[in-house]
């Protein structure tokens, strides 16, 4: 099973584009981890905006694209760049899975701190600043760290069946999660001799 874990960084903030319009933000950088199967460190890869035509065939081949808020954010940022239907690519959104279990949204850093003992190296606004100030190395490093954290949370949840975070009362919560994925079967015409 070809698995791609990804994180997208953008050029602009939502304030700059007039609201929650991920497709208007412009992509500065995409970090991915590519691996066969559902374990192992995988191969980290970097894609700048100009490299997106090389990324899309990989996403199309993937059996699963994993991310944190991948459905409502990352995949939506691809819309202006991608000529086909981005929703046809199979995704697993860890944020949605955790929210479904916990009953509310929890940030990647909050989950990473308690589940893995490590966190993000900054926030999305830092990535936009790195882009605006042309600090390419910092932008790449920041995004790839988010990819690694996302991969490790996915692996932990898949193996242990839970993730951890602190609630608003600073109490440690062990939140059950189901990160399993069943590919959708193509509903095409079945050819049979029967």
Image (cartoon, grey):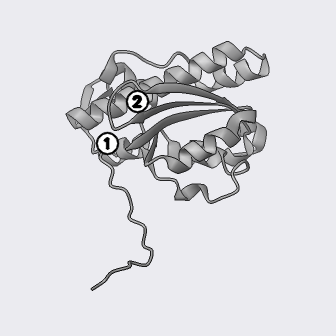
Q: Nearer the viewer, mark 1 or mark 2?
A: 2
Is residue 15 visible from the viewing direction of this image?
yes
Would you identify the image quadrant in which residue 7 lies? top right
Observer-nearest residue: 161 or 15? Answer: 161
Residue 151 marker: 2
Looking at the rendering, which quadrant does residue 187 occupy?
A: bottom left
Is 72 placed left or right of 38 in the picture?
right
Q: Position of residue 112 (x, y in %)?
A: 38, 24
Instruction: Report the quarter where the C terminus lies.
Output: bottom left
Cα–Cα span, label 1 and label 2: 20 Å
Residue 104 can be seen, yes or no: no
In the image, is residue 161 above or below residue 190?
above
Direction left: furthest residue: 160
Coordinates of residue 55 in the picture (x, y in percent): 62, 39
Badge 2 crowding class, 10 Å Cα cut-off, few under 14, some 14 to 19, many 20 or more, is many
The image shows residue 139 at horizontal and vertical percentages of 65, 19
- In the image, is residue 114 above or below residue 69? above
* Earlier sequence position, callout 1 versus callout 2: 1
In the image, is residue 95 above or below residue 30? below
Q: Quadrant of the N terminus?
A: top left
- Residue drawn at point x = 76 percent, y = 45 percent: 18
Q: Position of residue 31 (x, y in %)?
A: 57, 29
State left or right for residue 181 relative to residue 49: left
Callout 1: helix, strand or loop? helix
| Neighbour tally class for label 1: few under 14, some 14-19, many 20 plus, Cα within 10 Å | some
Judging by the rendered image, the residue that carries numbered circle 1 is 102
Res. 1 mark: none
Cβ atoms at labels 1 and 2 below 8 Å apart: no
Describe the element under mark 2 as helix, strand or loop: helix
- Which one is nearer the viewer's eye here, 14 or 155? 155
> Number of labelled discs?
2
């Amino acid at each position: 099973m070809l698995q791609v874990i990804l994180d997208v960084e953008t050029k602009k903030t939502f304030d700059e584009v007039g609201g929650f319009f991920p497709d208007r933000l412009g992509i500065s950088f995409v970090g991915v981890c590519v691996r066969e199967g559902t374990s192992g460190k995988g191969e980290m890869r970097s894609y700048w905006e100009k490299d997106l035509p090389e990324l899309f065939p990989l996403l199309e081949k993937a059996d699963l694209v994993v991310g944190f808020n991948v459905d409502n954010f990352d995949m939506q940022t691809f819309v202006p760049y991608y000529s086909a239907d981005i929703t046809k690519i199979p995704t697993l959104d860890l944020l949605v899975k955790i929210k479904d279990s916990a009953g509310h949204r929890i940030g990647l850093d909050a989950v990473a701190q308690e589940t893995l003992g490590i966190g993000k190296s900054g926030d999305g606004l830092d990535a936009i600043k790195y882009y605006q100030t042309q600090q390419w190395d910092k932008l790449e490093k920041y995004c790839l760290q988010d990819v690694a954290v996302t991969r490790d949370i996915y692996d932990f949840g898949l193996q242990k069946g839970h993730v951890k975070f602190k609630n608003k009362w600073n109490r440690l919560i062990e939140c059950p999660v189901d990160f399993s994925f069943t590919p959708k079967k193509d509903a095409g015409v079945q050819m049979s001799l029967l």
